[in-house]
Amino acid sequence: MDYYTFRQNQPILSNNYNYGLSTVGEVKPTFTGKRGFRLNSSIRHASEWPISEVSSDLTVQVGSSSFCLHKFPLVSRSGKIRKLLTDSKTFNICLSSVPGGSEAFELAAKFCYGINIDINLLNVAKLRCASHYLEMTEDFSEDNLAIKTEHYFKETVLPSISNSILVLHHCEALVPVSEDLNLVNRLVIAIANNACKEQLTSGLLKLDYTFSGANMEPETPLDWWGKSVAVLNLDFFQRVVSAVRSKGLRQDVISKILISYTNKSLQGLIVRDTKLEKERVIDSESKKKQRLIVETIVRLLPTQGRKSSVPIAFLSSLLKMVIATSSSSASSGSCRSDLERRIGLQLDQAILEDVLIPKNPDGANNTMYDIDSILRIFSIFLNLDEEDDEEEEDRHHRNRFGDEAEMIFDFDSPGSPKQSSILKVSKLMDNYLAEIALDTNLTTSKFIALAELLPDHARIISDGLYRAVDIYLKVKTLEHFSHFMN
């Protein structure tokens, strides 16, 4: 039978889809130098495609969808379908691996029929991958789908941060084809380049306003795109952050992006104290996912110093999650140590809530809080104090023949913690002792170890320490009295 025998009321799609788009009214093949297929300019609108008057001679199975189509328009554009139809007696083919599935194939097939399709941010990634899979290149037809999607990609997607992030998100479902086509890498680099260009432009504008003395217009925050990047999966997000860091994006901007991503990605991953076996399984999976997110975020944190762009409240939250989801893996231990070090470096900025870190519910200790972690954190801060004292002694020795004023210990110098910082930490310790003193499972040895941790010069007065000791003794007295009565 000829490909284009007309027949009335011939069903087109076996899955009864109704597409409602413009379709080919009259099919008249003409040939070009590349054996391309061009449709007659006579086009009409119909409720379904391809035209119902032409009987199909090919059924294409894509996933659970079947498309009753015609061979000639498809082979004129698609190299893959042309190869599959080397035998003229072939009437059915299966394309189970089309990137983007039946939706992408439908758009590609319409393109083969000469129907104008809308290439946009939501479908450009899958159309680009589908055109690669179907071999819809210039080797088979001029202005084919691959070149059209590539043009849109270059002109509309890559110049924009927000567009790049959205298309990158759609690339997640198209791996590994989107990786093989280098779409993912190009998008990541584009985001990094554009973000750093905005940072440079913002800095130059500030200089212009500074020298001109004019009132500066409110500027768009450099992390304006930070919330939109939170839609990415963990792997793609990690690659974006690594790229913007390597390009020189400011650390405070990176910190805000990390905080935004963490807050959004951990929603719903609450570690629960489960009772039913089914809930335990769910909780275990949540813990694994939460631990992976936290460990990745910690690796992406900017370089730590006393003047850190990462808020200590955020670091404390991460540490609490690490402890709650901890495992025996080396990565968990390294992650925990890193966070304890970071918190210790800026402990003078902490409040009581930041150091009230619950212990792992599966741990051996019965205390309410992780005392060992706090001992390490305070020790890190105190070791910094000792290191600064040694540095100050060296500086004092080097300048012993210099100006006498330079030989005085300067607590406010950038290289050493201020005396006010040490006093803040001592007050924090006393408040912490008063809080944990209420824990009846806290051993005396642990309480004494914490109370004696700070050096004598850290406290001007010891009222806070006496108060904590008084609370602890009263709790222990009541505990012993309760045991005696029972």
Image (cartoon, rainbow, N blue to C red):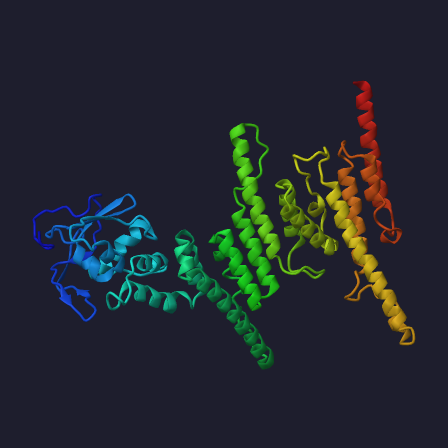
- Picture coordinates of residue 373 (x, y %)? 73, 45
When the figure is inspected, residue 285 is found, relative to residue 69, above or below; the finding is above
Seen from this angle, which residue lies furthest bottom?
212
Is residue 251 visible in the rendered image? The answer is: yes
Is residue 419 visible in the rendered image? The answer is: no
Seen from this angle, which residue lies furthest top?
486
- Picture coordinates of residue 146 (x, y %)? 31, 64
Q: Please tell me which residue is depicted at 88% across the width and 73% down the height of the picture.
A: 399
Quick check: 33 left or right of 160?
left
Quick check: 152 left or right of 387?
left
- Tally the numbered discs: 0
When the figure is inspected, residue 273 is found, relative to residue 409, above or below; the finding is above
Write down the quadrant of residue 160 in the picture. bottom left
Nearest the camera: 4 or 225?
A: 4
Nearest the camera: 265 or 483?
A: 265
Write down the quadrant of residue 26 in the picture. bottom left
Quick check: 57 left or right of 298?
left
- Picture coordinates of residue 477 (x, y %)? 84, 28
Q: Quadrant of the C terminus?
A: top right
Quick check: 42 left or right of 482?
left
- Picture coordinates of residue 412 (x, y %)? 80, 65
Write down the quadrant of residue 416 in the picture. bottom right
